[in-house]
Image (cartoon, rainbow, N blue to C red):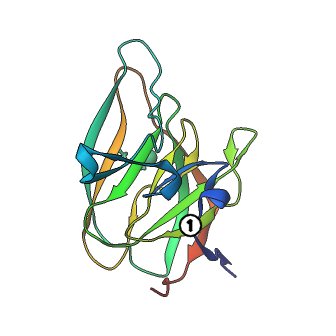
Amino acid sequence: MSDMLSIQPLTPEEFAPFGEVISARPETMRLINGGTTERFHALFSPEVTGEGARVIVNIFRGQPRAFPYQVGMMERHPFGSQSFSPLSGRPFLVAVSPDEDGRPGRPQVFLARPDQGVNYRRNVWHHPLMAIGEISDFLVVDRDGPGNNLEEFFFDTPFVILEPHL
Ligand SMILES: NC(=O)N[C@@H](O)C(=O)O
Ligand code: NI
């Protein structure tokens, strides 16, 4: 019997142990440019560590995942944070796990709205990008530099995500 993972709405509170939700939060807004622009200020701070590390901005073009989807692995980036912000106006799935003695615990799955992004704090277990329904672009802010910034863990038995109801 497969171990199904439920999908919950993405909220800053529920995601707080893993990082930040990137969204136009009213409490961060300040008017600039003579009142013509709303600046949602300092939503998160990218973190990079290690000699020669730098923050980079990328675009990831994700193929949609097929469902039921098997979550067979999680990964983490020990030397830097990683954020995903939708560019295609589509929702996407986010899966994160607490660290349990160097291994990921049971994944928690969130449905991110098209106006929400996420920042995974450095060394937080997460599943690679999961686009839904159509090819989707994401602006990704993460780390470039020396060293291996990718640690992967493969579960003995995969978890399963059923098709989300959008
Ligand atoms: N490998 C890579 O750059 N992407 C992953 O880190 C991911 O979280 O999608
Ligand atoms: Ni990653």
Q: Residue at x 67, y 48 (%)?
A: 17
Q: Position of residue 89 (x, y in %)?
A: 29, 71
Q: Nearer the viewer, residue 8 or 12?
A: 12
Q: Is residue 96 above or below residue 52?
A: below
Residue closest to the far bottom = 165
Extreme right residue here? Answer: 101
Q: Can you say which quadrant of the picture contains the N terminus?
A: bottom right
- Looking at the image, residue 16 sits to the left or right of residue 113; the answer is right
**SS for tag 1?**
loop
| 127 relative to 141, above or below | below
Q: Disc 1 marks which residue?
A: 10
- The residue nearer to you, when weighing 97 against 33, is 33
In the image, 19: left or right of 63?
A: right
The quadrant of the picture occupied by the C terminus is bottom left
Count all numbered tags in the image, as a single digit.
1
Image location of residue 43, percent across then percent down: 46, 45
Q: Is mark 1 within 8 Å of ligand 1?
A: no
**Foreground residue among 16 and 39:** 39
**Residue 161, percent from left and from top:** 55, 76
State the image quarter where residue 149 is shown. top left
User: Is 152 placed above or below 164 here?
Assistant: above
Q: Residue at x 61, y 48 (%)?
A: 18
Whether residue 104 sits left or right of residue 166 in the image: it is right
Height in image: 153 above or below 90?
Answer: above
Extreme residue in the front direction: 34
- Residue occupying image coordinates x 54% and y 65%: 71
Local packing at callout 1 (Cα closer than 10 Å; few below 14, some 14-19, many 20+) is some
Spot occupied by residue 67 in the image (x, y as percentages of width and height): 45, 81
Kind of residue at badge 1: Leu
Q: Residue at x 48, y 47 (%)?
A: 119
Q: Is residue 77 left or right of residue 105?
A: left
